[in-house]
Image: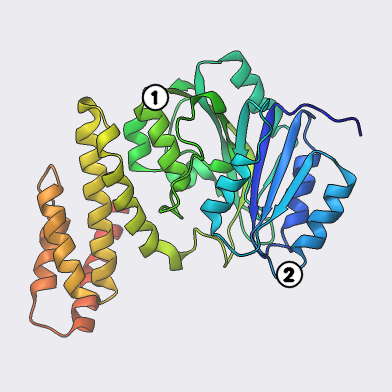
Amino acid sequence: MKPIQPTISILMATYNYARFLPTAIESVLAQEMEAFELIIGDNASEDATPEIVAEYAARDPRIKPFRNPTNLGIVENFNRCFLSMSPQSRYFILLPADDWWTPQTLRRLLEVAQAHPEVAIVHADAYRTDEACRVLNRYSEFMGHHLPEGLHQAVSLLMRADYIPAQSALVNRKFIQEEPPFDTELRFVHDIHLWLRLLLRGHTAYYLAEPLAYIRKHAAALTTEANIEPRLREEVRMFEKLAPLTPPRLEPARQEAWANRLAALSFHLLGASKIEEARALLQKTAQVSPRARLDLIAARWIAALPLPKNIRSQLWNLAWGTAQVMRRA
């Protein structure tokens, strides 16, 4: 194949995903445009990943792999992929090795990016699937957002929930100020942290309502229930980190988002019988929150009861479950 100058760099970080990797790579090679490079960072996998990557790289020169001698973590791996981009590449997009694309993904995102050179992020909807690739729902339905298609600067909405799936978000490289772009302290929220930094600096995004990616839900994914607590801890830290970047008009939204994450972490810790830390965070949440909250009052009251930890935990879980049912009714 004749060498093609890449317009888009696809950053694929992988670790022990040999069972998913062919689907991801094949979805890239099936794209309706050719001017891309696929940079695959193998994070010292111990399965058949090196052999699979080498086989594909031998077939297509647009595939540019590297292998880390030790596992650096997913964020550092994505950063290494970014630093390996060709100088002439104008855009980049993340594709975790357990996910995949429709054949139209890059073409549709690039069409919008080229029509709107002022846009920092072009992002689309996606499908969520189970491990066997059966569609569960659309990402927008799961997140509960109703963002209209087109140009936007919906920072406050993004602070409430990450409506931008990384698998269908094309980033214009010229707007990146920090290189590499991802904060290595934020393993679970490195992508939303980048989106927020771009929008808080006044850049614009564009939303395509069509689903262009498939996000696989499986036991080893970063989005599993087991990762709720570390993710919430990172979200709390992320909103602390964003304070210097936030303009005065958006500071109330940042404060509320920070308070909501503190509250969610506090509630999780209370339900997990981590009472002492939950008490401290509930007090901090009450100080940070811009408004009085009934859920905080109830949680602090339950945390203060002279009961065994497991009984308080059960009481809070019961109260929280009842509140959720009433909210949905």
Contact (CB < 8 A) between labels 2 and 1? no
Q: Nearer the viewer, mark 2 or mark 1?
A: 2
The image quadrant of residue 315 is: bottom left
Residue 159 picture location, percent across and down:
33, 39
The image quadrant of residue 103 is: top right
The residue at 13%/51% (across/down) is: 293
> Which residue is most to the right?
1
Residue 210 picture location, percent across and down:
60, 32
Q: Nearer the viewer, residue 326 or 98?
A: 98
The residue at 57%/66% (across/down) is: 220
Q: Residues within 10 Å of mark 2 (few under 14, many from 20)?
A: few
Q: Residues within 10 Å of mark 1 (few under 14, many from 20)?
A: some
Q: Disc 2 marks which amino acid?
A: Asp
Picture disc at residue 310? none
Visible residue check, residue 97: yes
Visible residue check, residue 144: no
> Could you tell me how many numbered marks the image carries?
2
Q: Which badge, 2 or 1, is on the more N-terminal residue?
A: 2
Q: Disc 1 marks which amino acid?
A: Gln
Q: Is residue 200 left or right of residue 18?
A: left
Residue 40 picture location, percent across and down:
70, 49
State the separation of the CA atoms marked 2 and 1: 42 Å
Q: Is residue 299 left or right of residue 154?
A: left
The image quadrant of residue 112 is: top right
Picture disc at residue 153? 1
Q: Is residue 29 left or right of residue 122?
A: right
Q: Nearer the viewer, residue 114 or 144?
A: 114
Q: Which residue is mark 2?
A: 47
